[in-house]
Image (tube, rainbow, N blue to C red):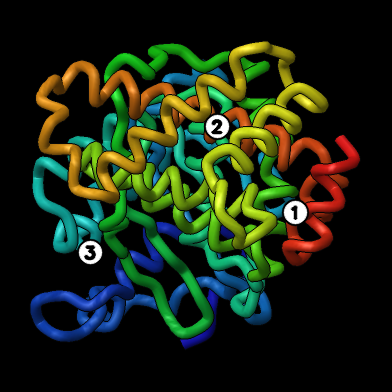
Amino acid sequence: MTPPSKPVSSTDLLKYRLAWAPTAEGRPAMLREGREAPPESGSAVLRVWAPLIDFPWQGSECLLHEGMKIVPPPSDAALNDSAIRYFLSDEELDAVRDASHWIAIDQPVRDPVSAAAKINIFLIALWIVRPTLTHVSIRVQQAPDGGRVSRMVDRFQWIKDQLHADLDEAHLAAARDLLPGLFAVYAARARLKNALSLTFRGCISTDWQSSFICFAAAVEGLLTHAQTPGLTSRLADAYSKLLDHYGSRGPSHREMFIRLYNVRSDVIHGRAYKRESSLSNLTDLTDFSNALRELWRVVLVHEDVRTNLEQDDAARAEFFASL
């Protein structure tokens, strides 16, 4: 069988590749039905689509990064393909159909940042700028060796009082501007990558204590510059210096940080059982989440900050002393 020579739309690619996914009979639908082979996708190119569920943006399309954009959803015909129906429950399919936008990614198969990581990095950027209900449940992948539907098991959670029901062009542009820094941190796989991974774990946790500890560990990963006693005070100083120098000035930065970091100590040292107010726990989690969001914004917007924080403790200490 020879692939079609005419240009192929993303919707057609989606339909072809889903039809090549395994079925209950053990063979791809295309082969079982005797159809043509799927369209050629280029040399070692991976293409991925994922529905942005509960994404409140009212625009149509947006280029986020090279090879990565927000697009309208595929046609109903593509979503009704037997292959995608095989992989998804009716409830999942309804949620996917209701998605007003999808994220589309074209990249080399051996890209240092995987398509799944790019999706999660976009969600982190969105969370930093403006937390919403947006999440991704599945991704549809087309590669030279075939296509498949995968569930995104680690899904973003949200704190009710932190949520926003709208997302305008300025918010999306701000999230887009954070992507180069986030991709650089991820691809470097150096010191800040650990803080990014911990931030992600905090964002997907369904338990306030687990989320708080992950956020606290992420903050330590961003700010730690010595192993001597006095950690809380040292982190609070580093946080307030960064925010005062690069972000929004405020006399309460240091005091706020110490108050919230003490909550982390309660959890770590087994005193959280005394915290019986769910409202208070979620309020503190929201405040610490917002503090980490602001910290990441400074790190990602200012390349000199990011460069210095990738260094060892001695270089970091020198950097903080200069602020």
Among the two numbered marks 2 and 3 on one chain, the one whose residue lies closer to the N terminus: 3
Q: Secondary structure at mark 2?
A: helix
Q: Which residue is mark 1?
A: 309
Residue 271 visible? yes
Relative vertical location of residue 126 with respect to residue 103 in this rendering, above or below = above
Residue 63 visible? no
Q: Measuring 33% from the left and 76% from the top, which residue is drawn there?
A: 35
Q: Measuring 43% from the left and 65% from the top, which residue is drawn there?
A: 141
Residue type beneath disc 3: Ala
Q: Nearer the viewer, residue 151 or 306?
A: 306
| Quadrant housing residue 184 | bottom right
Q: Nearer the viewer, residue 219 or 322?
A: 322
Among the two numbered marks 1 and 3 on one chain, the one whose residue lies closer to the N terminus: 3
Q: Position of residue 4 (x, y in %)?
A: 55, 72
Q: Secondary structure at mark 1?
A: helix
Q: Position of residue 235 (x, y in %)?
A: 60, 41
Q: Which residue is mark 2?
A: 293
Q: CA distance from mark 1 to mark 2?
A: 16 Å
